[in-house]
Each structure stands twice: as structure tokens, then as C-alpha cells.
Image: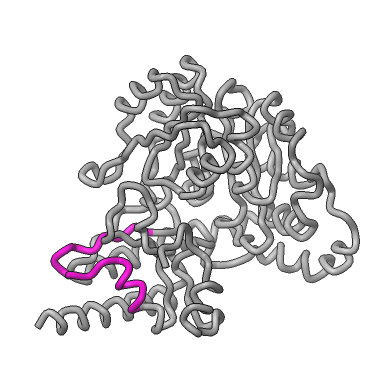
Amino acid sequence: MNETHGGDIYEVARQKGIDPAKIIDFSASINPLGLSPRAKKKILKEGLAAILRYPDRRCDELRGALADVHSIPEGSILPGAGSIEFIYSLPRVLKLGRILLVTPAFSEYENALEIQNRDGRIHFFETREEDGFELNVEGLLLSLTQGYDALYLCNPNNPTGILAEKEDLLRVLAQAEREKVWFILDEAFIDFVPGGSLLRKAADSSRLIVLRSLDQFFALPGLRAGYLVSNSGVIDKFSRVQEPWKVNTLAQMAAVESLQDKVHTDRTLAYVREERENLTLGLQAIPGFIPYPGSANYLLVQLHPSLNLDAAELRDRLIPRGILIRDCRSFHHLGPYFFRVAVRNRRENQALLKALRLVHKEILKRAG
């Protein structure tokens, strides 16, 4: 199976006849410390009573918490059922035509554009392996003069984990505003990289739309929560087409408490930084495994062709050992030798490294 995104342990479990609870899911990049203790306490104390009421359709408390945390106007924020809601509504609401998509990239951008905008054309701006997947800013600035309706860029990039410099993105934004190009900036993982966001620019920009997810950093993938930040005109456009009660009661409750749990946020940042470094070192110690220097809670890894092992085979060899990784074949401009792994807790990361070392031994034995 060539999956289009991670986190579908249920499909893998069905196909392989494995209990999903026995799979360590490295294909989905979720906070390894899990849900905020404040959020857990709030849900256990008030959640059952709260689900008997309709959700606040305006998400006023959540919008207020986001405004306080990020020091942005409440009127520039529109909560939704994960950032994926906005990824799928963007082409329709903005009536997008020619698109410039920085790759490799999250596959749902292209899926949404093809479904919602069948007459549009998608052009790819490739970040190259030989450049360490760093963004070629000068090339991108030039490309923006070629008549596009929108630029899609994810920062930090998914799946490479490479973070574009804030100063470079400000140059891209200025060019997009001059050329009247919508700049769709997906910051789904930016909470793992404090200081790298353009969020505070969005309310006053004529062309910037920032997408944010609460699923990854705050460990809410089963509840689905995210938000869009832009100027009031854009917020009004999206509000008009948004279905009522998109963000459920428990998602709003958990998100508010998580945003206000500064202790959990600080612990997460320190823990992920340490475990990412440990996991990187462990991967580097396995001959033929080449991890890229990610900035978020996941790592892109390349298998050296001399191993005669591609990511699909590696994935299949790990599943019986109870480990699921993300084969990156479905990402544009990544070949068969790339895979992505989440940074999980110490015990799970060690289990991954042990399994990879065993597979490496098996491959060497096969080679004779």
C-alpha cells in the first residue's frame, strides 16, 4: 500500500491482521508527551456534561485563548476542524487557478486542489536533495513573477523538517503582495519551533493566509482542531461558507486548556529537542541510514542505495515487529529510498532503533 499520509494504523492493522494497539505509530508526528495534564483534568471533570450541549459555534473562548497566546486580534482567527478543513476549502473560496506548490509537500494540498479546482494548474517549485532541501529563495521570488494565483508553502517543511528562515519568508511575502499572489503558509508544526512564525503578520497582510494545526503539538488528532489566521476580509469569506459547529465541544475544551498550559509546552519543547538529537545520533550509527537535520518532531531519513533496501521493503519488515514508519514515495520529488519517522518517547525511539539494526543485519546477511 502506497499511503498518502501517515497515521492510518487501522488500515495497516486490518491488512496485516495485527491489533492496532500493538503498533507503535512512527508514521504520525504527534507530541510524544501526549495531551496536556490540564486538558485531561478538564475533560474528565466537565467533558461528559459538556457533550450534552451543542458546541459554541463561534468558538469564542478558543479564539480568545489563541489571541492571548499569540498576541493577535481575535477577528483575525477562524477555528476549524483541523487545518485540513481549510486546505480543502481554500481553492473553492479563493477561486484559485494557477498554483505554485513548494515540494516535497503534504499530499493533501494537491488532493484538495484537484478536487476543488479541476480547471486549475499546479506547478511545482522543487527543493532539491543536493541542496539539503533548503528553500531557494531567489528562485522562488523569480517564480512569483510568472502569473500565479497562489503559493503553497509548509514551514517547517513536511516531510523534510527543514525550516525556512523568517527573514526569507518575509521577502517571499513582500513579493507575493506586490504580485497579488495569495501566500498560503502552512505552519502545522511551527509550535515545535518557537520564533519562526509569520502569524503576527497575517492580520495586516493583504495576501497572507496562515494555517495552523492544534493536533500535532497539543496531541489532539482524534478531536480535530486547527485555525486559519488572516485579514478580516479573508476571515469573513471563510466564515460565510463554514458549516456550523465544526469544532466539537471536547476539541474546544482541550484546545483552550492546552494553549494555557505553559508548563506542558515548555516540557514538550525540551523533551522533543533532546529526543530528536538522540534519535538522530542513533540513526547515524546505522550504516546506510542518513537522517536529515529536522527542526520539528519528525525526521526524514534516506537509505543509501548500496543497502539494496528501499523504504517500502523497510516498512514491510518493520510492521511485523509492531512498528509503522512513513514511506515517502507519495511525496513529489522524493525517491523510493526516503522514509519519515516521528520523534516519540525514549522507550519507543529505542525500540525503533533496535528494530532498524535488526533489519540492517538481515539485509547484510541477504547480500551474502
Depicted 331 relative to depicted 271: above or below: above
Q: Quadrant of residue 167?
A: top left
Q: Quadrant of residue 266?
A: bottom right
Q: Quadrant of the N terminus?
A: bottom left
Identify the residue shown where x is 33% and y is 68%: 312
- In the image, is residue 308 part of the stretch drawn in magenta? yes
Q: Position of residue 128 (x, y in %)?
A: 26, 42
Residue lying furthest top in this view?
178
Depicted 201 relative to depicted 153: above or below: above
Identify the residue shown where x is 60% and y is 28%: 95
Residue lying furthest front in this view?
119
Position of residue 215 in the picture relative to residue 178 (left or right): right
Q: Position of residue 256 (x, y in %)?
A: 73, 52
Depicted 130 relative to depicted 119: above or below: below
Identify the residue shown where x is 44% and y is 81%: 322
- In the image, is residue 176 part of the stretch drawn in magenta? no
Depicted 119 relative to depicted 64: above or below: above
Position of residue 112 in the picture relative to residue 229 (left or right): left
Magenta span of residues: 299-317
Q: Which of 30 and 317 lies nearest the eye of the viewer?
A: 317
Q: Position of residue 205 (x, y in %)?
A: 58, 22
Q: Which of 328 and 158 lies nearest the eye of the viewer?
A: 328
